Amino acid sequence: MKMEVLLLILLFRMSLQLQCDKTEITAHVGGEFILACQYDSSRYLYSKKYWCRGDSRNTCQILVHSEEIKRNTQRSHIIERIGRRALFVRVTNLRLDDADVYWVGIDKIYADIMTSVKVVITEVPVSKPALWPLSSLEDRPTCDGKPVTVRCGCAKGTGVQYAWYQAHTHREPFLLHSSSDLYLHCRTVEKKSDYYCVASNDMSSLESDVLSVQVLLSAGDSCIYVVNIQGQPFYDCMDRMSTTTVTAPPVTSCQAPTEFHPESHNQSLLTNDTQTHLIFSRSWTGVPFWYMLLRWGALIFLTMFLCIVVKCTKQRHKNMSRRRR
């Protein structure tokens, strides 16, 4: 019993001689941490201080100490501020395997003064993944049926894993493959599909914006399709549609035929309404029909008015001639 009490008293006195601001540190991969400790400079100002790794104070491995400055060029550093009676331990470029129990120690005859700290290392949470094509969409390669590769990537995150999904309206999303790249080609795209990427690690998981693919013409390796990515230039392939020879009805408006350019219900209604009222909104020359009617009506009215004036003038001259006679 007396031995236990003496041990507790000894540990208490040691804690007063060396105190650190943390007993547990949580940091992420690639980051760093700084541990600040105060000690009794009146007794241990010139004693060796060290940073030690291991579960036991008796068997831990010294990584760096104050008397061997050249070892401070590694990831672990000991910095003394004599005027402030302070000792700082700094560890940089952290890795997952740095998680462990560490000790700050002061060399002392018979028994070193030591205090422990637990270090926990976590992954960096992922940021929202961005999508970008590896070839420029402004060149409209899809209008000629060429393949396009879209890449998914995060600005932040460690140990990130990527997966591509195809979205469905009435059922669960379908996992395409676990990769950062999505390869689009005539043989792989459907008539209208939405895709998105998921970036994840042990800390978090986030989805990208939706990537939309719309097939305008299904013709094997010579198909025509459009890829829409938020933040990328908008383009279409309508001029390509109008010059492509296929066994299908000709394109008569800015919307593609239903056979090879399926749209949503609202877009179909808009197309039909445009075709139905085409004759009422514009003439064959491109001038509004109502303007043509107004112009021809004014011309006819002016002509009739002039005819009436001329006729009345002639009749008046005849009446005046008769009166003179």
Image: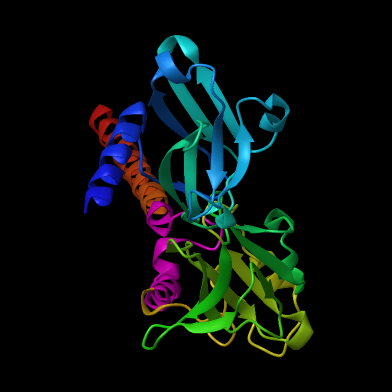
Closest to the observer, 172 or 84: 84
Q: Nearer the viewer, residue 255 or 278?
A: 255
Tell me the quadrant of the picture where the C terminus can be found: top left
* Residue 195 x, y percent position in the rendering: 52, 73
Q: Is residue 181 above or below residue 103?
A: below
| Colouring convention used in this rendered image of the protein | rainbow
Q: Is residue 269 left or right of residue 208?
A: left
Percent of width and height locating residue 174: 50, 85
Residue 206 shown left or right of residue 16 in the figure: right
- Count the labels in the image: 0
Q: Residue at x 66, y 88 (%)?
A: 248
Q: Is residue 8 left or right of 51 when viewed as pictured?
A: left
**Residue 252 visible to the viewer:** no
Q: Is residue 63 visible?
A: yes
The residue that appears at 75% across and 65% down in the rendered structure is: 141
Q: Quadrant of residue 314?
A: top left
Name the main secondary structure of what is drawn in magenta: helix
Is residue 14 shown in magenta?
no
Taking the spot 30% from the left edge, 32% from the top edge, the residue there is 13
Picture coordinates of residue 256 (x, y %)?
57, 76
Question: Residue 301, position in %: x, y?
Answer: 34, 49
Quarter occupied by residue 288: bottom left
Q: Is residue 262 above or below residue 181?
A: below
Residues shaded magenta:
267-293
